[in-house]
Amino acid sequence: MTALLAGAAVTGCGGGKGGGNGGDPPVTTSPPVTVSPPLSPGPAGTTTEPAPPGTSATQDQGSLPARLVGDWKSEGGNALIFYRFRRDGTFSNASVLNQQRASGVFEFIIDVSGTAETDGGTLTLRVTSGTHTRKDPDAPSGDYTRPARRETETYAWSVSGSVLTMRDDSSGNTITYDRQ
């Protein structure tokens, strides 16, 4: 999902977590979406750390904390990442990486949904459906839309004001999102 897109923005479409599509040619792109330093407490008076395990952040099973619920967007360089987290513990992710080429616009699109749960500072996303699409004007015979892998990703997360920060536990990439 996002790790794949962030990895694609950094290393090429075959290089991100969950990528493994084998036939994806490497691409060179602009810097990735808003990358921040590791999570750290914010200025005095702001809430940046999630609640500890067993508190309101881990409300009734199948629900998400109110501060996470809603629409979040990050954009920068050639990438746009959008998340929608619902109170019932589900999420949707739509991400697009575009690159202008002489022959047209290269696109890599992620459109997935699944379940989300929090445990203190950990956000776990489990993809249950969706697609990954590649459109390459330089190699249109390799274009595809494939079912997304049913994968699980974990993130360290926090919300400070209207900013969501998610750090991928496996890659260490940190992306910030603005509440919409």
Image: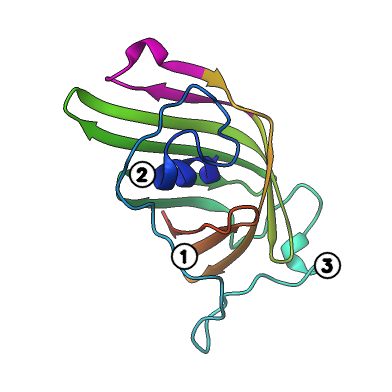
Image coordinates of residue 126 in percent, x first then y, are 69, 40
Residue that label 2 marks: 79
- Which of the two discs, 1 and 2, sits closer to the camera? 2
Q: Quadrant of residue 12?
A: top left
Q: Badges 1 and 2: C-beta atoms under 8 Å apart?
A: no
Image coordinates of residue 146 in percent, x first then y, are 54, 19
- The numbered dot on residue 163 is 1
How many C-alpha atoms fall within 10 Å of the one at disc 1: few (<14), some, or many (≥20)? some
Residue that label 3 marks: 54
Magenta segment: does it hold 169?
A: no
Q: Regarding mark 3 in the picture, which secondary structure is present there?
A: loop
Sequence-wise first label, 1 or 2: 2
Q: Quadrant of the C terminus?
A: bottom left
Sequence-wise first label, 2 or 3: 3
Query: At 54% across and 46% down in the image, what residue appears?
Result: 3
Horizontal relation, residue 126 to residue 39: left or right: right
Horizontal relation, residue 71 to residue 147: left or right: left
Three-letter code for the amino acid on which mark 1 is drawn: Val
Q: Is residue 160 above or below residue 34?
A: below
Sequence-wise first label, 1 or 3: 3
Query: At 48% across and 45% down in the image, what residue appears?
Result: 7
- Which of the two discs, 2 and 3, sits closer to the camera? 2
